Image (cartoon, helix red, strand yellow):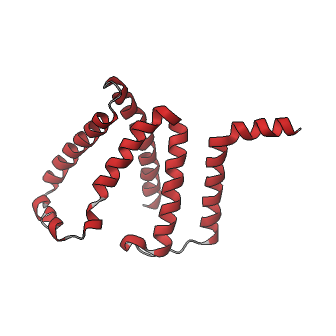
Amino acid sequence: MILISFALAFIAGIAIAVQAAVNSQLAGAMSGNTMAAAFYSFLTGMIVLGVIAFFRGGLAESLSVVPSQPAWRLVGGILGAGAIFCTVWLAPRIGLANLLVLVIAGQLLSSVAIDHFGLLGAVVRPAAAVKIAGACVVLLGVSVTLFGERMIALLARAF
């Protein structure tokens, strides 16, 4: 079961990259209107999720608890919309690879902190040294992705 979960997470990562590229192209077709492209992305996603949730049943009962929730539990959609807008706006400006390595770095660092400290009600999962080492390797990869050409040029000048 864990391998299926890992595969699904990997596929979700592919979907994020494809979504950023597709939404950026949509924004271009919409005369560069990144807000309209992000809106369309969320609108279609909302419709699909709404249909699935409706047919699974219990949608009204589940939504009935929303008014009683603390505000911090209700910002997920706003955060998601902001993230989607940023991918649509940034992909053509900094490139998809640069965008996604920075997104991954942000996700990795914040998720390690959330797990380690049990933030936002998450289960505490202490960050072992090997996990921190893995995060450092990923950050090194981010640095090489973003600045590798400059690093090589500096090294070439030095020798």
Residue at the location (66% across, 52% down)?
Answer: 140
Q: On screen, 142 above or below 58?
A: above
Quarter holding the N terminus is bottom left
Residue 21 screen position, x and y as percent: 42, 33
In the rendered image, residue 72, in percent from the top left (x then y), is placed at 30, 66
Q: Is residue 39 above or below residue 55?
A: above
Is residue 95 visible from the viewing direction of this image? no
Q: Is residue 27 left or right of residue 149?
A: left
Check the image and report above or below for 84 versus 123: above
Numbered circles on residues, count: 0
Which residue is at 16% across, 64% downward?
A: 62
Residue 120 spot, x, y in % from top left: 37, 70
Percent across and percent down for residue 75 are: 29, 59
Instruction: Left or right? Give the position of 38 relative to 126.
Output: left
- Residue at left offset 22%, top offset 41%: 43
Front-most of 132 and 32? 32
Q: Can residue 143 be seen in this snapshot?
A: yes
- The one nearer the camera, 38 or 136, is 38
Q: Is residue 138 left or right of residue 158?
A: left
Q: From the image, which quarter does the C terminus lie in? A: top right
- Which residue is outermost to the right? 159
